[in-house]
Image (spheres, rainbow, N blue to C red):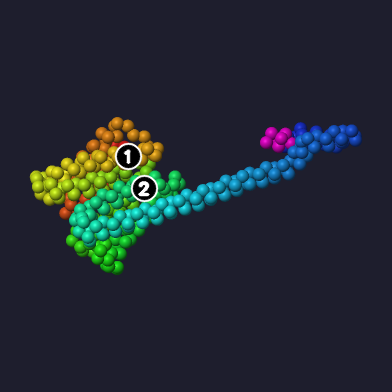
Amino acid sequence: MEFSHIVSSPLARSTGACNHRLGNGSTTIFQSSAILFPSFVRPRLAGKRDRFGRKRHLGTYATLDAASFMVASSRDLGVAALVTAGGYSLVRAFDRLTMRDLIEKSLSRKIVHVLSGLLYTASWPLFSSSSQARYFAAVVPLLNCIRLLIYGLSIVTDEDVINSITREGKSEELLRGPLYYVIVLMVSSLIFWRESPVGIISLAMMSGGDGIADIIGRRYGSLKLPHNRRKSWMGSISMFIFGIIFSVMMLYYFSAFGYFHLGWSTVEKVVLISFAATVVESLPLSEVIDDNITVPVTSMVAACLLFGF
């Protein structure tokens, strides 16, 4: 770069002209300096060579970026396929247990409710660090969303799937709670992803906290809440406790991968979020709005206020 500035100066041009007017000895000196400093003689050629070098480096970087994009996309596609197959296998496994009368239908459905969300969230670190990884992860609940729409609208009928997911065995039930569930999974992965504790806590509260509340509440919930006779004290207490447990476990799981740093104040914030979600879940809103909407939305709002968006 310094050489090109020297050549382009008027002093260098005048010096070159004087050398041409000198005798043979001066011409020899000029030729020898040309060998040592070729840019003195051919500045345009040197500039073209520099530009060609820059283009070659840019082309190399573009090739590397394209190769890394293909590698990351292949990895994310493989993980998405693996998670999809795992989720399908989980549902089928509990279907078989229900058909063999090894587990109650309602219990099987709620266990799948708990495990599906937690295992899906736990799979996020398996995806690559590329910016498009969240979109590959969102494909998993998107496929389930399409599947529920197909069965819920009776485009295709599968009695085993309908009976294993719904409470009353009606296909239209798939268009409510189960559909809201997978939509929340998809939205959380697209908006919050693994760098934010907001989505992780929301999914832990919806799948873990609310799921365990239903399991324990149905068995030991004889003492009902005064403001909602369909909910019990045991169910609400279970949701509050297990919501905290699952949320903290998932947060420290992600912090182990270095996505964010957590301190003791994190537990205090999770307690407040779980309390808010438990209070909203206990209200007589389920007849109008499904718990798979109220619980994660409440958790998201509270988590955004405490952790930031």
Q: Which residues are magenta?
A: 1-7
**Where is residue 140 shown, x and y percent of the image?**
36, 55
Q: Quadrant of the N terminus?
A: top right
Q: Which mark is residue 251?
A: 1
Tell me where residue 229 appears, x and y as whole percent: 10, 49
Quick one: 238 or 296, which is closer to the camera? 238
Residue 274 is situated, as x and y percent measured from the top left of the image, at 23, 40
Amino acid carrying mark 1 in the image: Leu
Q: Which quadrant of the rendered structure holds the C terminus? A: top left
- Inspect this view and state whether residue 184 appears: no
Q: Secondary structure at mark 1?
A: helix
Residue at the extreme right of the image, as rendered: 24
Up-down relation of residue 114 to residue 308 (above or below): below
Placement of 230 over or under 2, stated as above or below:
below
Q: Is residue 176 above or below residue 298?
A: below
- Left or right: residue 163 compared with residue 68: left
Check residue 4 for magenta coloring. yes
Q: Main secondary structure of the magenta part?
A: helix
Q: Is residue 231 magenta?
A: no
- x 43%, y 54%: residue: 77
Q: Which residue is mark 2?
A: 123
Q: Is residue 223 visible?
A: yes
